Structures are given as structure tokens and as C-alpha cells.
């Protein structure tokens, strides 16, 4: 769908399906990163993600010659910009997961849709409607209810997440610009080619020797979810404006708060559900207007 073009119910359903994959991928990735952080550094964990993606995509390119034809150097500067931003955001987010509760990391990360909305209007020329403003306002209000930030409880590691949010927003805008001229396969291939050396630069090249049999499951989850998260998000941008697609990621907060409570005994109170209600209300309003082409 072109930027600024009216959405249809069909395209909104496509966005919902692809964003469901994003939510599941990132939600599965978070506890896996925390589990592996006891053995590996963040650079080494992210190396697993990008190396797995590159192996899978290279195998597909070898098996299907038509995919190799999609790999060109047009807009390589934009690919590089996207990947530097994505790498920076991913590193800061992953490090924060080892230092802060899940709900806090995800809540602060969810300032990203506000940045995306601002950048989409300024850079992509997308329309700012009442529902698009509403989903950001209600989403941020939900976050405040869940985290109830205060100076007394401020943790310096929170700045990592805020920096990641801005980087993710910039990466999202680059992705939206790329999707009009590049295939999903090309975007994902260049992402892994460019980010793997960045990750290896900070890694022990023999870090796989640190892994034990108990690390196999989180390694697999990170390898798979690292690829599927970007596959689903990039495809979602093909069917919707950035200001429709990205706010759906707000739904990840109440889900990850429940996982943090269930598996890690992190605090969970009624405000999580009150905040989630605001988040969901804003998302539904935005999707309703998008389906009507408003």
C-alpha cells in the first residue's frame, strides 16, 4: 500500500496477521536472551541471530536463482542506515533485558510508536489523523499506568531502552521507504550481511564453545525469532502505513508482563490490566478507522 493511501479491510487483516508474528517473535526472544546472557555476551547472542538468518537466506538464494536476482546494490546507503539503526537499537534493547524487569523494558521501548508517528509525518508524508494521534496517546497513557515512573525509582539502564526506541523508529522509517523498491528477501539478506560483522566485532570468535546442552533451546528460539520478527514486520509495512502498523506493537506489553510474572516472579498488579485496556482501546480505534479508509 502506498504511503498515505487508504487502507482496506483486506490490507488491515494482512497487517494484523503479520504483526501477530512480530508479537510472538519478540515475546519468545526476550526470555531466551535473558537465559543466554548467563553464558554469552550481548554481541555473541546477537551473532547467533544474524548468523542463523544469513545461513537460512543464503541457502534459499542458492536453491532459488530468482531470489539471487533480487540482491542489488540500489539504495545500499539506505540499507546501511537501516541496519546501523537496527543494530544499535537491538544491542541496547538486549542489554536492557538483562538489567531491568521485562515490563519496564517493553514499556519504555513502546515510546517507539510515538517517534514513528512523528518521523512518518515529517519524512514519509503520511497523514496524521485523530485515531493515529489517539493510539499513541492512549498507548503512552497505558504505559504510564503500568510503570508509574518516578524520579525515586529511576534506573540509569532505562536510558538504554529510550535510545533503542529512537533507533527502532528510525529503522522502521527506513524499512517503509525501502519496501517500495526492494523485496522483503533483499532487505533481510542485507540486514544479516551487514549486522553479522558488527556483532562479531565484539564477540569471542570461539564463543560457541561456551554453550552447553541446556542452551540449545534458547539458541534455536533466538535464531528463528530473529529472522521471523523482521520478516513479519517488513511484510506488515507492505500493507499499511507506519502509523497503522507500529502501534500494534503496544499489545506486546501486557503479554510480556504476564510472562515476567509467570516465569520470573516479577511484580504484577491491577494497573497492568488497566494500562493494557487503554493500549488495546487505542489499537482498536486506529484499526477501525484504517479499515474504513479514514
Image (spheres, grey):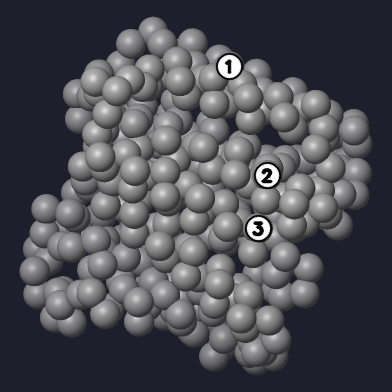
> From the viewer's perspective, is the residue at label 2 or at label 3 nearer?
2
Q: Nearer the viewer, residue 48 or 204?
A: 204
Quadrant where the C terminus is found in the figure:
top right
The single residue placed furthest to the front in the displayed view is 151
- Along the horizontal axis of the image, is 79 left or right of 244? left
- Along the horizontal axis of the image, is 281 left or right of 53? right
Q: Mark 1 points at which residue?
A: 278
Q: Can residue 255 be seen in this view?
A: yes
When the figure is inspected, residue 99 is found, relative to residue 172, above or below; the finding is above
- Of the numbered discs 2 and 1, the one sitting upstream in the chain is 2
Q: Is residue 48 visible?
A: no
The single residue placed furthest to the top in the displayed view is 270
Please report the residue visible at 41 percent of the width from the left and 11 percent of the height from the top. Answer: 271
CB atoms at circles 2 and 3 under 8 Å apart?
Answer: no
Please report the residue visible at 68 percent of the width from the left and 44 percent of the height from the top. Answer: 118
Q: Which of 58 and 91 is in front in this view?
A: 91
- Along the horizontal axis of the image, is 34 left or right of 170? left
When the figure is inspected, residue 186 is found, relative to residue 28, above or below; the finding is below
Q: Name the residue under label 3.
A: 173
Please report the residue visible at 81 percent of the width from the left and 48 percent of the height from the top. Answer: 126
CA distance for labels 3 and 1: 25 Å
CA distance for labels 2 and 1: 21 Å
Quadrant where the N terminus is found in the figure:
bottom right
Label 3, secondary structure: give it. Answer: helix
Label 2, secondary structure: give it. Answer: helix
Measured from the top left, where is residue 175 in percent x and y?
64, 63
Q: Name the residue under label 2.
A: 118
- Of the numbered discs 3 and 1, the one sitting upstream in the chain is 3
Amino acid at each position: 500500500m502506498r504511503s498515505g493511501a487508504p487502507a482496506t479491510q483486506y490490507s488491515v487483516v494482512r497487517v494484523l496477521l503479520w504483526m501477530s508474528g512480530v508479537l510472538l517473535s519478540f515475546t519468545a526472544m526476550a526470555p531466551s536472551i535473558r537465559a543466554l546472557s548467563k553464558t554469552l555476551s550481548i554481541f555473541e547472542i546477537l551473532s547467533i541471530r544474524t548468523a542463523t538468518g544469513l545461513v537460512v537466506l543464503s541457502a534459499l538464494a542458492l536453491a532459488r536463482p530468482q531470489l539471487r536476482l533480487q540482491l542489488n546494490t540500489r539504495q545500499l546507503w539506505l540499507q546501511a542506515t537501516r541496519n546501523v539503526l537496527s543494530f544499535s537499537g537491538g544491542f541496547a534493547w538486549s542489554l536492557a533485558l538483562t538489567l531491568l524487569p521485562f515490563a519496564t523494558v517493553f514499556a519504555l521501548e513502546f515510546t517507539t510508536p510515538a517517534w514513528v508517528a512523528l518521523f512518518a509525518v515529517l519524512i514519509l508524508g503520511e497523514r496524521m489523523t485523530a485515531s493515529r494521534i489517539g493510539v499513541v496517546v492512549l498507548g503512552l497513557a497505558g504505559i504510564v499506568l503500568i510503570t508509574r515512573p518516578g524520579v525515586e525509582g529511576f534506573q540509569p539502564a532505562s536510558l538504554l531502552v529510550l535510545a533503542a526506541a529512537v533507533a527502532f523508529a528510525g529503522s522502521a522509517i527506513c524499512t517503509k521507504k525501502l519496501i517500495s523498491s526492494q523485496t522483503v528477501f533483499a532487505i533481510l539478506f542485507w540486514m544479516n550481511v551487514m549486522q553479522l560483522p558488527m556483532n562479531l566485532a565484539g564477540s569471542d570468535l570461539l564463543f560457541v564453545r561456551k554453550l552447553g546442552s541446556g542452551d540449545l533451546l534458547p539458541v534455536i528460539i533466538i535464531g528463528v525469532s530473529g529472522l521471523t520478527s523482521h520478516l513479519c514486520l517488513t511484510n506488515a509495512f507492505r500493507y499499511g502505513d507506519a502509523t497503522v502498523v507500529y502501534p500494534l506493537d503496544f499489545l506486546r506489553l501486557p503479554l510480556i508482563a504476564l510472562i515476567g510474572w509467570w516465569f520470573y516472579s516479577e511484580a504484577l498488579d491491577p494497573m497492568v490490566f488497566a494500562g493494557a485496556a487503554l493500549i488495546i482501546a487505542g489499537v482498536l480505534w486506529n484499526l477501525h478507522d484504517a479499515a474504513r479508509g479514514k
